Amino acid sequence: MTIEELEQIAKNVQQENAKYDYEVNVCMDLACASQGAGALKDALVKAAEAAGKKVLVRRTGCMGPCSHGPLVRVDPEETLYRHVSAEMADIIVQHLGGSPVPELQCDLNEHFDKQVRVVLENAGYIDPEKIDDYIAHDGYKALLTVLTEMTPNGVIHRITESGLRGRGGGGYPTGLKWGTVAKAKGDVKYVVCNGDEGDPGAFMDRSVMEGDPHRVIEGMAIAAYAVGASKGFIYVRAEYPVAVSRLTTALREARRHGLLGNNICNTPFNFDVEIRLGAGAFVCGEETALIASIEGRRGTPKPRPPYPASSGLWGKPTLINNVETYANVAPIVRNGGKWFFSMGSERSKGTKVFALTGKIANTGLVEVPMGIKLREIIEVIGGGVPDGHKFKAVQTGGPSGGCIPEEMLDVGVSYDALLKMGSIMGSGGMIVMDDTSCMVNVARFFIEFCMTESCGKCIPCRAGTAQMYTLLTRICTGAGTMDDLALLEDLCVTVKETSLCGLGQTAPNPVLSTLKYFRNEYIEHILDKCCRAGVCQMAAIEPENEVVA
Amino acid sequence: MVGTMRVAPNAVPHRLQLSGCSGQGGIVPVITPPPLPSEDKRWKIVNGTMRKNGFARHALIETLHTVQSSFGFLDDDAIRFVALSLHVPLSQAYGVATFYHYFTLKPPGKHTVTVCAGTACYIKGADKLIAAAEKRLGIAPGRTTPDGQISLMTARCVGACSRAPVVLCDGEVAGEITREQMLEQLERWAVE
C-alpha cells in the first residue's frame, strides 16, 4: 500500500458515494442498537427502494446524544432525527430532498456547538466495518506519512510538541513515555493498547473501539514505529463483544490492505496486532496487572520500578497507552503538534471525551476542549438536571475519583484542577447526581466496588477497603458513631499511602471527597439518624443498637 | 469445587518427552497434547484456540474464554485439560479461573438475567432492581434457581450507561428498564 493507492481508494469511495442523492446515517452504537436501530436500518433500505430514491443507508458509530436515540442523520443537509423507530422509515424517506420531518427533528445546537471533535471526528460519519470509509476520511494517511517521511525521533518530537497526556486517567506526558520506550535497550519491544475500560459509568473507549477501530490501530502502528516495536496487543474487556468483533474485522481488513504485516508501505517496518480478552477484573486496568493478564496469569500488580517502559510484557520494554490516547495520535501527526497544543488549557492540551450519564437530560458521549467549565458541560451540553430536581454533585474518575459539588462547577476541566478538587480526570466517566442521591451511600457503593475488585495482593487494600465498607455500612444503617467517622478518615489515609497499586491508592478518594464537600450528610446519618435523600434505611435504630451507638 | 482438583498420575508424561534430545546439549521438547476429554465436538474448538496460539502458556485466558463460550462454564475436566495442554500448573489454571469474575465454575440456568450494577445504573436505581429480582427468584446474585431455569447475575458495567438502568436478558441489552418490566420477563421465563 502506498500513499497514491490510499488516495485512489478514497477517490473510489467518493465516486461511489456520489452515485447516491442522499446519505442516511443510522447510529448503531449499543444504546441505539438496543432500541431497534438494526430493524430501523433495514426498514430505511426497504423504504428507499420502494420510493425509488437513490439513498445510501449507512451504519455508523455513536453520534453522541444517546438519550435521544435511536438517532438518524440525513446528509448532505445534516438533519438529525431522534427517537426514530422502524415505522418512521417511510416518512423520513418521503421527506428526503424536501423539508425535514418536524416531529422527529432533534434540535441540539447548543449541545454540539460547545464540542470540538478530534477523537470522535469520524463517529457518526463512517461505517466502522469498512476500512475504505476510514481511508476516505484521511485514514492511514498519517501512518504512511510517518513511514515514508519521518524518523522515529521526529514522530516522538511531534507527539511531545503536542502536549498530549495519557487519557487513561493518570495524565503522564505521552511523548515522554514514547521517548523512554524508544531509548530502552532491547531488540524486542511491545506496544499495548489498554482497552480494559473498567470504570463503571464510562464507555468512551468502547465507543471509539466500536465506532472507529482503525483509528486505534493506526495510532498503535505509529507508536510502534516510533518506539521500535513490531508486535502489539489490544487488551479489551470481554464485556464488550461488539468492540472485539469490530476490532477483529478491522485488523483483518488492515492486514488485507497491507497496512499491518511485513514491510508496510514497502518499508522495512513490520507490525501486527493481536487482541487479548480481559475477563472482568477492574485491577487489570493497572498497567502491571494488565501485563500479567496478557501473559495469561492472574491480574495482580507488581511494584514499580521497573516500569513497563523498561521491563514490561515478558520482561521486554513495553509501551502501554489507553484507547483514547492512541486515537489522538493520527490527527496530531496529520495536523501537527502545534495544532493540538493550541487547544485546551495551560497544562492539559487537546480535547477530552466524556461519558455523560446519571441524572442529566442529554446523556451520551461528548468531546470538549480541555479547560471548559464543568458547569458548561453539565448545564449547556448536558442540558442540566431533569424533572425539577436539584443538582448535587458530579462524579468523575470512577471508583478512583471523587464527587464534585455545585460550588466547584466553575473550575475548568484539566488533570491538575480535578486533582486539586480531590477527584481525578480518570478515563472520562462523568456521572451527575441530584438531590435523590445520598453521598454517604454513593461513597459506600464505590468502596464496595473496590473491596470486591481488590486483587488481594497487598493488605492495606484488601483489608482496608473491607473495613471501610463495614464502617460505611454502619453509618448508612444508622449504627455509626463519631468514632467510626474518625476511624474511617484515619483508614482512608492509611490505605491511600500504603497500597501497592493505583487501585488501593485511589480507593479512598470517593470517601475523602464526599467527606470534604458533604460532611454534613455523614454527621446527619450519625447524629440525627437521618438520610436527607431518603436512600438509606436506618434499620439499625433498634434498642440494642442504640446502646452500641 | 475447592479441593477436588487432582492430577491423575498418568498426566505426568504429557509434560515433556526428552526422547527428542538432540545430543548437542540443546533439548528439543516433543510435546504430546493430552487426549480430548470426550467425543464432544466442542473440545475441538477449544483445541483450535490453543493451536492458534501455538499451545503457549499465555493463551490460558484465551482458552478458558473459548471453553466458557462453548460449554457455558468451566468445570474440573476443562480446567485440567487446558492446564495439561498448555503446560500450566493446575494451581495457576484454577487461580486464573477463580480470579476473574467473568469465568464461572457453575453451569448457568436456561435463562440469565444480568442486572448492571455500574455507577450510572446504581444512581438510577439498579439496587432496587437487584433486590426485586432476588425476592422474586428467591436466590442471591450469582446463583441459579433450583429448577435450573433462571440465573441471576450482576455486571460491573456493560457500557450502556446512557440508558441506565440496564438489564441484560440472555445477553440482550434492555435499557431504561423498570422493575415491572424486568419482573414480567422473569415471569415469562418461569412459566416456560
Image (tube, rainbow, N blue to C red):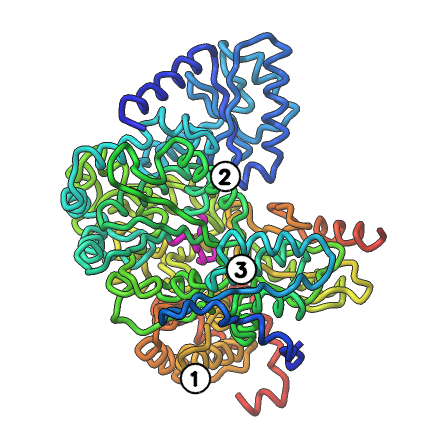
Q: Tell me the CA gap for discs 1 and 2.
A: 43 Å
> Does the magenta portion include A240?
no
Specify few, some or many for label 2: CA neighbours under 10 Å numbering under 14, 14-19, or 20 or more: many
> Would you place residue A45 above or below residue A223 in this image?
above
Q: Chain of mark 3?
A: B
Counting from the top left corner in percent of width and height, residue A524 is at 47, 74
Q: Residue at x 56, y 68 (%)?
A: B83
Give, as a three-letter code, the residue at label 1: Met
> What is the distance, in whole Å, between disc 3 and disc 1 at their CAs?
32 Å
Residue range in magenta is: A194-203
**Residue B73 spot, x, y in % from top left:** 66, 62
Per the image, the residue denoted by label 3 is B156
Q: What type of secondary structure mainly makes up the magenta span?
A: loop
Q: Residue furthest right?
A: B191
Q: Amino acid at mark 3?
A: Arg
**Residue sitting farthest toward the top:** A52
Disc 2 is placed on an element classified as helix
Q: Which residue is mark 2?
A: A66
Q: Nearer the viewer, mark 2 or mark 3?
A: 3
Q: Is residue A340 above or below residue A447?
A: above
Q: Earlier in the sequence, mark 1 or mark 2?
A: 2
Left or right: A41 with respect to A375? right
Secondary element under disc 3, as helix, strand or loop, is loop
Q: Position of residue A16 (x, y in %)?
A: 44, 14
What residue is drawn where x is 35% and y is 77%?
A: A499
Residue A530 shows up from this direction? no
Q: Residue at x 41, y 66 (%)?
A: A292
